[in-house]
Amino acid sequence: MKGNALDNMTDTDRKLQAKLLLARRAEGDRLALPDAVLIAAIDGSRVLTANERAALEASPLTVRRLRQLSLERRSAAGAPGQAANDDAWAGSHGMLRAAASGAALSLLVTDDNCWALHFVEDGGRWQVILKLAAEAPFAARLVREKPVVRVTDGGGAIVLQGRLDADGECECAWPFDTAPAPHFQLFGAAFAVEPVH
């Protein structure tokens, strides 16, 4: 008996299919399923219904969110013994979750609630401010060490890069022609905060 098409795919085929799936864009796309449903599907505690599977397949943004949650779960599983209050930090990720409402974007927060991006408009120009949450497990160490950090959008472009100050902040002019909300939507609504080594 022949295996199904997925069984016959090579690693290269799978990688190519994943890349094509993640690169898709759809007009008016938005997150079609909440994180709780996606996480339950990832950990196998709940099977997606036919309608949920259809919604996922029709929404490239939701597929990218599913992938991000899956990568985070795999990363957490690969760090056994790490305490919740461990001050090690290798990066944080987040998503623009609000549907396009026409309102200017003023704040984005990482999924771990450790970083906030504030957007301030002044006469048609934007300023972006990265702020480390005081309650982050690694806050004391980062404020003490004042490392260089980088914020990138879902396409990998640098939004902000600089050294944290004594208040756990870093600030720069918004580097793109497009305003923050539409810019992030163009690149999968994702962003990341990472240390620069």
Image (spheres, helix red, strand yellow):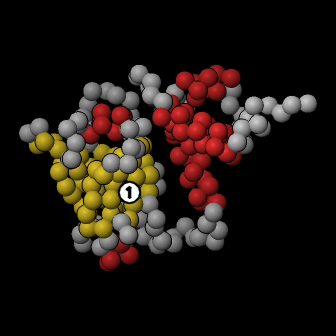
Q: Quadrant of the C terminus?
A: bottom left
Residue at left 40%, top 22%? Answer: 28
Image-based side of 170 in relation to 41, left or right:
left
| Residue identifier under label 1 | 193
Classify residue 8 by image quadrant: top right
Secondary structure beneath label 1: strand
Pick the front one: 30 or 17: 17
Residue at left 20%, top 47%? Answer: 174
State the image coordinates of residue 182 (x, y, percent, origin top left).
30, 33
Pick the front one: 112 or 88: 88
Q: Quadrant of the N terminus?
A: top right
Relative to residue 103, is residue 159 depicted above or below?
A: below
State the image coordinates of residue 73 (x, y, percent, origin top left).
60, 53
Tally of numbered discs:
1
Pick the front one: 21 or 182: 21
Image-based side of 174 in relation to 116, left or right:
left
Residue at left 34%, top 28%? Answer: 100
| Residue 109 in view, yes or no | no
Residue at left 63%, top 43%? Answer: 12
Classify residue 36 by image quadrant: top right
| Residue 111 in view, yes or no | yes
State the image coordinates of residue 62 (x, y, percent, origin top left).
52, 34
State the image coordinates of residue 158 (x, y, percent, origin top left).
30, 52
| Residue type beneath disc 1 | Val
